[in-house]
Image (cartoon, rainbow, N blue to C red):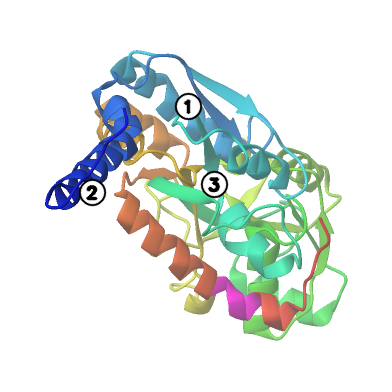
Amino acid sequence: MELTTRGGDRRWAWALRATCGAALALAPALAFAQSDFPVRPVRVVVPQAAGASLDIAARVVGQRMQEGLGQPIVIENRPGANAIIGMETVARAKPDGYTVVMAPPSAVAINPLVFKQLPYDSLRDFAPVSQVTGITFVTVVNPALPARSLRELATLARKRPGELAFGSAGTANMNHLTGELFGQQNGVQLLHVPYKGETPAVTELISGGNAVMFTTLPSVLPFIRSGKLRAIAVLGDARTPVLPDVPTAAEAGMPGIATSGWTGLLAPAGTPSEAIARLHREVARVVKLPDVAEALARQGADPVGSTPEQFSAFIRSEIAKWTKVVRQSGVTLTP
């Protein structure tokens, strides 16, 4: 349509143009808001291998989310490169709410500190949806190791500097940096041995190839219960009901190494706020369900379900927390 203007009609024409332009700009958002999101399966990328603590949380929560959303939740494991592969997959995905990532703290809060170049920016390329869980961290040792407490472990490490090996799910993740933090707090040096995921690291610990591991409770709880591993400390703020006799780091006199893991749902930046809100509401609903909370507790995880704003602030606080540890350790990586 062509508008002609003369005299006093010119201001009316410009006003009409502005109104039409605003309506056209709002049209996509209005169309999305009026849609019944989701109308097809939602893909949840897990940047770790199947069976890892992150994967367990994604499957427990995802199974019940699909009931409320009315669409399947498809779990897609994309492990490798310190979770970079999975994170990049989602960062580059279409921002429509149908592709999200269940992210670990290493991918969000640590990778930006240790990689000089990353194919994604934790703060710029993602829209926080919700922190899904908090995950208890524990220190476990091979039962043959003569250390039944953190103090005994530190004493043993002083006697054998650089000899006691600790495994982790790769370089510069929370497993690794918690071990570095333990060394920094106690003035001891452990030998770091990275693996491609928690599962092979735990397997090697059980076989005696490594002496100790600082890791998530879900990944080692079955082996603690079977006696194949010994838990010597819980690294959270309080004891866990599943291991009531295991003291916390603070009770052991080492509050400075307190660490907890977490899982969080992130969408690509630019995802419509309506989709973010819908996914958040579903996460918050599901983690409060008694059977889900119980299933998570059995794995050493606590339900959270925070708002997108709360999760965003939490991510920034985690980045600040690990900055000092990374600087002192001097760890740097190349993707």
- In 3D space, how far apart are the residues under numbered discs 1 and 2 (Cα atoms)? 39 Å
Quick one: 319 or 223, which is closer to the camera?
Answer: 319
Q: Main secondary structure of the magenta part?
A: helix
* Mark 1 crowd level (few <14, some 14–19, many ≥20, 10 Å Cα): many
172 w.r.t. 76: above or below: below
Res. 302 in view: yes
- In 3D space, how far apart are the residues under numbered discs 1 and 3 (Cα atoms)? 30 Å
Find residue 144 and report its image quarter: bottom right
In the rendering, which numbered label is found on residue 98?
Answer: 1
Q: Name the residue carrying label 2.
A: 14
Find residue 40 and report its image quarter: top left
Cβ–Cβ under 8 Å for marks 1 and 2 = no
- In 3D space, how far apart are the residues under numbered discs 2 and 3 (Cα atoms)? 64 Å
Image location of residue 204, percent across then percent down: 81, 44
Q: Secondary structure at mark 3?
A: helix
* Numbered disc total: 3
**Which residue is at 82% across, 81% downward?**
159
75 w.r.t. 130: above or below: above
Magenta segment includes 116:
no
* Mark 2 crowd level (few <14, some 14–19, many ≥20, 10 Å Cα): few
Could you tell whether 83 is left or right of 15 in the image? Answer: right
State which region is magenta.
321-325
